[in-house]
Image: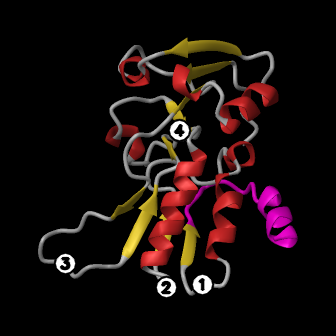
Amino acid sequence: MNATIKKLVIETQAADDPLTRRLQSEYPHAAVEMVDDPVRFLSRSPAGKDTIVLMRHGGSFVKDFHLPPCSPPCGERYIITMLNCPYSCTYCYLQSYLDHRWIVLFSNTNDISNEVRNALERDPSGRLTTGELGDSLALDHLTGATASLLPLFEGRDAYLEVRTKSAQVNHLIGAVSQG
C-alpha cells in the first residue's frame, strides 16, 4: 500500500524510537502532533487513514488465541505489532472489533523482538502469526516488522505465519535473500 500519510501522531516517550524516526524521515512533510497520553488521544474524534499513531505498547506482544472452554489448545499464538489497517474492507472484523479507527504502530520494536525470541526459546517448534489486529504487510515496508522477526525463526522448527491482504513482499524478498 502506497499510502499518503499526512499526519504522524507521536507519543512523547516514542519520539526517539527508531521506527518513529524512520517514519518522520519517510514522510518529512507530514504534520506532527506530540501527545503525552496516546490512549486518551485514540478515544477522540474519528480517525483518517492518512494518519499514523506511533506509541509504545506496555502490554504483552505475544498472546495466546482465546478459545472456547471446551476447545483443545491449538498451540498457536499471535504477535501484535500494530492495531488496525489502512484498508477499509467492509467484511473485516476490525471495523467493529477495535474501539477506534486509528492506525497504531508500536514503536518499541526491540521489545517485540525480545518477547518473540523468549517465546521461541520456551517453545522452539511453535507457530506464531501476525495480522490478528492489523494487516501484517500493508505498512510493513515502512515498519520492517516482519523482516526483523524472520531471523528469530532461523534454525528452528517454529513457523511465522504472516496474514495479509497486501501483495507488498518485495522488501521481504530482499531481506530473506540477504539473511
Range covered by the magenta-colored residues: 162-179
User: Is residue 89 in the magenta section?
Assistant: no
Instruction: Give the position of the N terminus as an image quadrant.
Output: top right
Indicate the amino acid at tag 4: Ser
Instruction: Give the position of the C terminus as an image quadrant.
Output: bottom right
User: Is residue 173 in the magenta section?
Assistant: yes
Pick whichever of labels 3 and 2 is earlier in the sequence. 3
SS at badge 1: loop
Indicate the amino acid at tag 2: Ser
Q: Residues within 10 Å of mark 4 (few under 14, many from 20)?
A: few
Percent coordinates x, y for residue 39 in the rendering: 38, 25
Percent coordinates x, y for residue 47 in the rendering: 49, 21
- Circles 2 and 4 in contact, beta carbons < 8 Å: no
- Circles 3 and 1 in contact, beta carbons < 8 Å: no
Closer to the camera: disc 3 or disc 2?
2
Q: Name the residue carrying label 1.
A: 156
* Residue at left offset 55%, top offset 70%: 161
Indicate the amino acid at tag 3: Ser
Question: Which numbered marker is on residue 71?
Answer: 3
Q: Name the residue carrying label 4.
A: 88
- Circles 2 and 1 in contact, beta carbons < 8 Å: yes
Q: Name the residue carrying label 2.
A: 125
Q: How crowded is mark 2: few (under 14 residues within 10 Å), some or many (20 or more)?
A: some
Which residue is at the front of the view, 8 or 5? 8
* Residue at left offset 35%, top offset 78%: 75
SS at badge 3: loop
Indicate the amino acid at tag 1: Arg
